[in-house]
Structure formats: C-alpha cells, structure tokens
Amino acid sequence: DSGVTQTPKHLITATGQRVTLRCSPRSGDLSVYWYQQSLDQGLQFLIQYYNGEERAKGNILERFSAQQFPDLHSELNLSSLELGDSALYFCASSASWATDTQYFGPGTRLTVL
Amino acid sequence: GIQVEQSPPDLILQEGANSTLRCNFSDSVNNLQWFHQNPWGQLINLFYIPSGTKQNGRLSATTVATERYSLLYISSSQTTDSGVYFCAVGSSNTGKLIFGQGTTLQVKP
C-alpha cells in the first residue's frame, strides 16, 4: 500500500458526460500528480500541483481540469467525455516539487461507452 | 523532450532465472524511477535512482547518468515478478515523469 488513495476504483459512463476523480496524497506529501495510461499512448503525465498551486502541465486536454484543495487532496475533472478517454488514471504524490520519489495510487479505471 | 527507451520489450523466463532490463534516456536527468505494474494494474515503486547503485532483496538497479542509461537486475525470478516494468525519468524543476514503453516480463513455473 503506497498510502495514496483514489476513488472511485472503476467508473463507467457515456460519451458527453462529466466525471470527477478524487485523490488523497500520502500524509505529509505536498505534490500531487495525475497520469493517464492508455493502450495507444502508454503512461502520460497530465498535471502537477504543489501545495495548492499548479506546478507543471503536460498534454492535458482542455476538456480536463484539476485542482488541489487546502487539505491537499486533488480532483481531476473530465468533461464532454469521448470514447478515447477510456483509460486508467493514476494519481501520485511526493514530498517535494521535483526530484523526489513519487508514490502511485491504485488508479481509477474509466470506461466511456 | 527527453526520449526514454526500454529493452527488451518482452521477456519470458523460467522461475529461478536472472534477468537484466535496460533503460536508455536521451538527455541528462535529475529523477529516475523504476516501477513494477502487476497484473492488477498497480504501479509499485521499486527504486528512486537518478545515479548510483541500490539493492533491495532480489532486485538491484544501477544508473550511469553520464552515459544515460539505467539497468534493473532481477535475480532468482519468481512467478510473482511477472508484469510490466517501467522506467520513468524527470529532467526539469518539476516532478513531471516521462515513462518508457515498458518491458513485459513473464516468469513461468
């Protein structure tokens, strides 16, 4: 157990819908990261927050947004869902903002029908 | 951006055999991690090793940063070692990790 929790574990929804994925980092970690794992793109970095502020952005679609709250948990919002958004979404956390071990949560498996 | 290449893409071993997985990267890095993704999809952190050598039980890793590669050694492999092994690197002043395509390992009893 990495100490990073993610909910829900599975999510099945329809095209055009909006969903919210939730992540709680390890106790004491200030950075939260979101990654997407799909069959065609592999594991890709989406976005990083550090102590409530956006720190880095990857190839995150405009339909996707995220935030980190004062209690350091984070939410990833996916809207206008398309079939291609079906993937495993991981949250990770680390103590600092850069050169540090990242610990990954169990992931949320999103299926868009 | 940085390119990460892992080899071999697939590996089949008999239980008890040893193996070496390689990760090449195209630029200098300040973060390098090895992960094991088990058949249930969990990503388990194995090593944080931007340089040097580390060992943890039957696993060890070496990163030669000046030559831009890292090696993961698995000794006396067990069926529970099966899964996909990922190398991920970071090079900026953020924590962004760039993942390789992985090495899929199957250990047969």
Image (spheres, coloured by chain):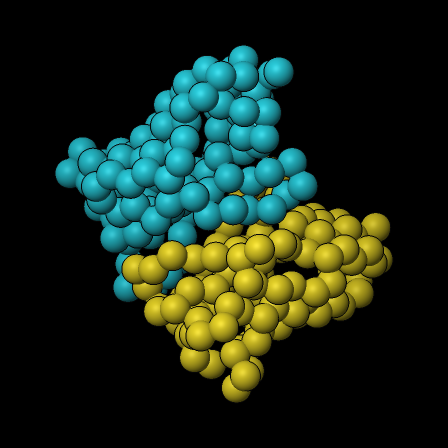
Q: Quadrant of residue A5?
A: bottom right
Rendered view: A83 above or below B13: below
At which x and y percent is residue B21? 39, 26
From the viewer's side, name the closer residue of B32 and B60: B60
The residue at the point 46 percent across, 38 percent down is B86
From the viewer's side, name the closer residue of A47 and B107: B107
- The outermost residue toward the top is B14
Q: Chain A colour?
A: yellow
The residue at the point 41 percent across, 27 percent down is B74
Name the side, left or right, on which B40 lies relative to A18: left
The residue at the point 53 percent across, 57 percent down is A2
- The outermost residue toward the left is B66
Rendered view: B23 above or below B91: above
Query: Is residue A69 in view?
Result: yes
From the viewer's side, name the closer residue of A106 and B75: B75
- The outermost residue toward the front is B57
The residue at the point 76 percent across, 55 percent down is A10
Q: Quadrant of residue A107?
A: bottom right
Q: Note the chain letter of the cyan one.
A: B
Rendered view: B10 above or below A98: above
| Quarter occupied by the N terminus of chain A | bottom right
Name the side, left or right, on which B60 lies relative to A77: left
From the viewer's side, name the closer residue of A85 and B88: B88
At which x and y percent is residue B28? 22, 46
- The outermost residue toward the bottom is A70
Query: Is residue B23 in view?
Result: no
At which x and y percent is residue A43? 52, 46
At which x and y percent is residue A56? 41, 66
